[in-house]
Image: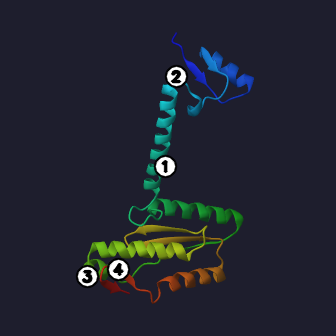
Amino acid sequence: MPNILLVTSKEDKQDVIQGLESGRRRLFDQAVFPENCTRGCEPAVGFWNFEDKLVAASDVLQYKATHDELTGLLNRASISDLLRRELGRTKRKGESVLSSWPISDHFKLVNDGLGHAAGDAVLCEAARRLTASVRPYDAVGRYGGEEFLIVLPGCDASSLRQRAENILENFHGKAFAHSIHLFP
């Protein structure tokens, strides 16, 4: 049987005995950290470095799977899932949740008249303004194209009115700038 090393942070004797009974031949009885390793621990240090890189890559993939690439907002699947969860939660608790679909009436004119780069800039600025207009626990997502979905949990009619006014205030009368061109 090959020598298999058991490295554990478990301190309870039963956990250690269970590990040894599972076929491990040798045991480090104290935690091993890269900074404490001396000669012969290079594979363990390599493992920790690999694990750090794997966790970082997993975080990047998780972000890409749940966020819109252009705006950085939650993507359609994520914001829809969040809305479904909020609707279920509010039904159980007897609370309210409101969602909003602000859509630009003239976005096609921007894309057709100024090009897709200008349209992308408008979408990014709209995302920034929407995010700045809501409470920290509200959620904003890009539902598709120029459609955004805002989930406002625990919002009654009067607080919805306040939220809508905050959003409109961040848009009304403030031009979206792109290069030399300005458009409302």
Q: Looking at the picture, how far across and down is residue 137, in whole percent?
A: 61, 67
Disc 4 residue type (three-letter): Phe
- For this orientation, the residue located farthest to the top is 1
Task: Determine which residue is flagged by label 2.
Answer: 39
Q: Position of residue 63 (x, y in %)?
A: 46, 54
The reply to whether residue 158 is visible in this rendering is: yes
In the image, 175: left or right of 152?
left
Nearer the observer: mark 4 or 2; the answer is 2
Position of residue 125 relative to residue 59, above or below, is below
CA gap, disc 2 to disc 1?
Answer: 32 Å
Is residue 46 positioned above or below 23 on the image? below
Q: Nearer the viewer, mark 1 or mark 3?
A: 1
In the rendered structure, which disc, 1 or 3, sits on the residue that comes first in sequence?
1
- Residue 153 numbered tag: none
Q: Are marks 2 and 1 in contact (CB under 8 Å)?
A: no
Choose the circle earlier in sequence order: 4 or 2: 2
| Residue at horizontal 34 percent and vertical 85 percent from the top | 182
The residue labelled by disc 1 is 59
Is disc 4 surrounded by few (<14), some (14 to 19) or many (20+) residues within 10 Å?
A: some
Quadrant (top left/top right/bottom left/bottom right) for the C terminus: bottom left
Q: Which residue type carries mark 2?
A: Arg
Q: Nearer the viewer, residue 111 or 118?
A: 118
Which residue is disc 3 drawn over? 113
Q: Secondary structure at mark 3?
A: helix
**Mark 3 belongs to which amino acid?**
Gly
Contact? badges 1 and 3 (CB < 8 Å) = no
